[in-house]
Image (tube, grey):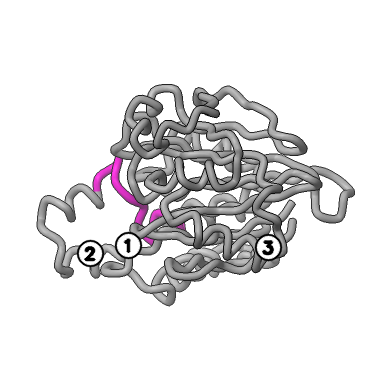
């Protein structure tokens, strides 16, 4: 399996995941033209994409869904409850498949399980994606969770089986509180259904490094106004430094908003 975030942030989100002969995209908050350019730069033919998954209805994850699906000629998978709110973004594209949290489905060589998260959307999900390793000597699991206000205990337990995790590290709390947002927006971001702080992300990653099998963690959806990559990475490293193993063997990175991230092979 290999994966790459083509864009990550409030201005637009899209991720690529591939394994064997199966290639999929998760979210479509950027233009179809940009997605095609990034895929071609990765050496992935646009017509090889088998499916587009949408995590929830917010525009930075769904606004380009219809145009992208039409450009790639692939089905779109959306949450059953979110589907009515996505009709405009889908632009009449007829090839729609609905899913429900907790019910896995197969797309080629991949098995996808939508997992419900706490976020202020109608039916928000992250995804656990399992598929063959890049070396072909076993199966690996990737978690994609980019919009959530809380990593609650049941979710943390589900993430224990992940070899790699893309997890939101949206804001530094001090930057958020002293920044330009209105008080109402600050409260929304900090709420249990808002966005994950650096500290909350760091706590979750440290727990997975200690008790799970996590080998790769990518910090995503960093706020342009209320965070920096340096602060986000430092928060996680500080937590890892407190572990008996000091997080030894954990590969840590971050996803930019204006360009694709590193392509990671599992």
Q: Quadrant of the C terminus?
A: bottom right
User: What residue do we see at 26% from left, 69% from top?
Assistant: 225
Q: Report if residue 213 is visible in the image.
A: no
Q: Report if residue 71 is visible in the image.
A: yes
The residue tagged 1 is: 171
User: What residue do we see at 16% from left, 53% from top?
Assistant: 185
> SS for tag 1?
loop
Q: Residues within 10 Å of mark 1 (few under 14, many from 20)?
A: many
Toward which corner of the image does residue 105 lie, by quadrant? top right
Q: Relative to 23, does residue 175 appear above or below in the rendering?
A: below
Chain part drawn in magenta: 191-203
Q: Measure the alpha-carbon separation of dots 1 and 2.
A: 7 Å
- Viewed as shown, does residue 244 lie left or right of 119? right
Dots 3, 1 in contact, CB < 8 A: no
Q: Measure the alpha-carbon separation of dots 3 and 2.
A: 30 Å
> SS for tag 3?
strand
- Viewed as shown, does residue 88 lie left or right of 34? left
Q: Measure the alpha-carbon separation of dots 3 and 1.
A: 24 Å
Toward which corner of the image does residue 118 lie, by quadrant? top left
Dots 1, 2 in contact, CB < 8 A: yes
User: What residue do we see at 69% from left, 33% from top?
Assistant: 107
Which residue, as the protein is rendered here, is positioned at the far right? 137
The residue tagged 3 is: 264
Image coordinates of residue 136 in percent, x first then y, are 87, 49
The residue tagged 2 is: 176
Image coordinates of residue 48 in percent, x first then y, are 71, 48
Which residue, as the protein is rendered here, is positioned at the far left? 183
**Pair 3/2: label in front:** 3
Point out the tag, 3 or 2, that comes first from the N-terminus.
2
């Amino acid at each position: 399996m290999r994966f790459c975030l083509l864009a990550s942030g409030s201005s637009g989100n899209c991720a690529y995941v591939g394994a064997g002969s199966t290639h999929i995209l998760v979210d479509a908050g950027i233009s179809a033209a940009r997605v095609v350019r990034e895929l071609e730069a990765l050496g992935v033919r646009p017509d090889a994409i088998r499916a587009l998954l949408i995590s929830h209805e917010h525009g930075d994850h769904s606004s380009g869904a219809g145009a992208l699906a039409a450009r790639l000629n692939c089905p779109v998978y959306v949450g059953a409850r979110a589907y009515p709110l996505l009709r405009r973004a889908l632009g009449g594209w007829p090839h729609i498949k609905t899913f429900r949290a907790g019910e896995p489905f197969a797309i080629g060589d991949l098995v996808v399980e939508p997992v419900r998260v706490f976020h202020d959307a109608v039916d928000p999900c992250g995804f656990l994606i399992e598929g063959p390793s890049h070396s072909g000597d076993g199966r690996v699991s990737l978690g994609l969770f980019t919009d959530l206000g809380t990593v609650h205990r049941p979710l943390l337990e589900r993430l224990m089986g992940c070899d790699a995790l893309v997890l939101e590290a949206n804001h530094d709390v001090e930057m958020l509180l002293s920044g330009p947002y209105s008080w109402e927006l600050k409260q929304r971001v900090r709420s249990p259904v808002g966005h994950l702080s650096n500290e909350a992300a760091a706590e979750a990653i440290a727990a997975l490094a200690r008790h799970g099998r996590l080998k790769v963690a990518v910090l995503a959806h960093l706020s342009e106004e209320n965070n920096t990559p340096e602060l986000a990475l430092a928060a996680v490293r500080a937590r890892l430094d407190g572990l008996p193993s000091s997080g030894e063997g954990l590969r840590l990175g971050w996803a930019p908003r204006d360009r694709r991230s590193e392509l990671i092979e599992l």
